[in-house]
Amino acid sequence: MTTPQSPVKTASLGVTNAVFIGRSIRHSLRNIEALTMAVVLPIMLMLLFTYVFGGAIDPGGNYVNYVVPGIILLCAGFGSSSTAVDVAEDMTNGIIDRFRTMPIKSLGVITGHVAASLVRNLIATGVVIGVALLVGFRPTAAGLEWIAAASLIALFILAFTWLYAAIGLVAGSPAAASGYGFALLFLPYLSSAFVPTDTMPTWLQGVAENQPITPVIEAIRGLLTGAPAHDQIWKAALWCMLILLVSMLWSMWTFRRKAGRR
């Protein structure tokens, strides 16, 4: 008489996510070039705008305080964009099919990429702020304002990382994911990151003032430097939460359609 075999139990969601987060962090640590460029490129742009263009834009020498919030988001964007390539690689190299044969929630691979990117980009953002302080950035924020700014930056990184994850899922290859993701990196240049929007042509002001990057930059600028923020903080939070919600739903729907449900 044969004894019926017990069904294989699926690993809990928390254990699955922890495993995939560890996997993504190890991959990030091995890809030193990408991690370095995500930090070095924004720093180079900050030095370029501060020392080359800053004197022409703001002869008073305060341009560094204006430009740093935009550089912070540029750093976050560069760092998050690699998520699209990482997700596209997993979707095209067959690893997802292997995960589906294991007693785990295969959607955790996407969550792992997002969580690892959040940690990686928060560290990179801290490095950029440290360099900014060395080149003359002088924030006036108190403790609560720093906490609010850091929370908003983390929310922005999380929202755009999920957006890049969705792009990686719909892209046909890592190269295509890189190309699609690169287009989003132009948004900070069409915002108040480097110059006030009222200095732009009238037709461009409408674009700059009504896209999600501008309120986030203005909110961070207001929190860190005391610049007038008005209702930008709430607008920034709402934009980030909207992008986060849409991106998560898009990612989950696309993943289930491509990889199948568990």
Image (tube, grey):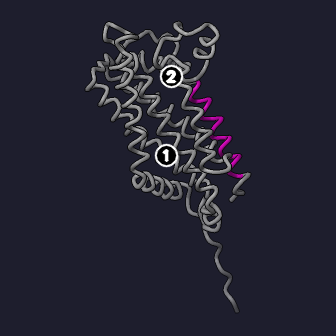
Q: Residue at x 59, y 8 (%)?
A: 201
Q: Residue 45 has which mark?
A: none
The residue under label 2 is which amino acid type?
A: Val
Using a 10 Å C-alpha cutoff, classify the residue at mark 2 as few (fewer than 14 neighbours), some (14 to 19) or many (20 or more): many
Side of 161 where 91 appears, left or right: right
Would residue 261 be counted in the magenta stretch?
A: no
Secondary structure beneath dot 2 equals helix
Q: Quadrant of the N terminus?
A: bottom right
Residue range in magenta is: 239-256
Residue drawn 72% across the image and 57% down it: 260
Which residue does the image show at 30% across and 31% down from the upper left?
A: 130
Which residue is at the far bottom? 1
Q: Residues within 10 Å of mark 1 (few under 14, many from 20)?
A: many
Q: Amino acid at mark 1?
A: Ala
Check the image and report above or below for 103 versus 33.
Answer: below
Q: Position of residue 165 (x, y in %)?
A: 59, 44
**Against 13, is 217 above or below?**
above
Q: Please give the residue where the numbered disc 1 appears in the rendered image.
A: 115
Q: Position of residue 77 (x, y in %)?
A: 50, 34
The residue identified by callout 2 is 216
Closer to the chain start, of discs 1 and 2, is: 1
Q: Residue furthest left?
A: 134
Given residues 86 and 150, the one toward you in this image is: 86
- Left or right of 23? Residue 225 is left
Residue at point 28% right, 25% down? 133
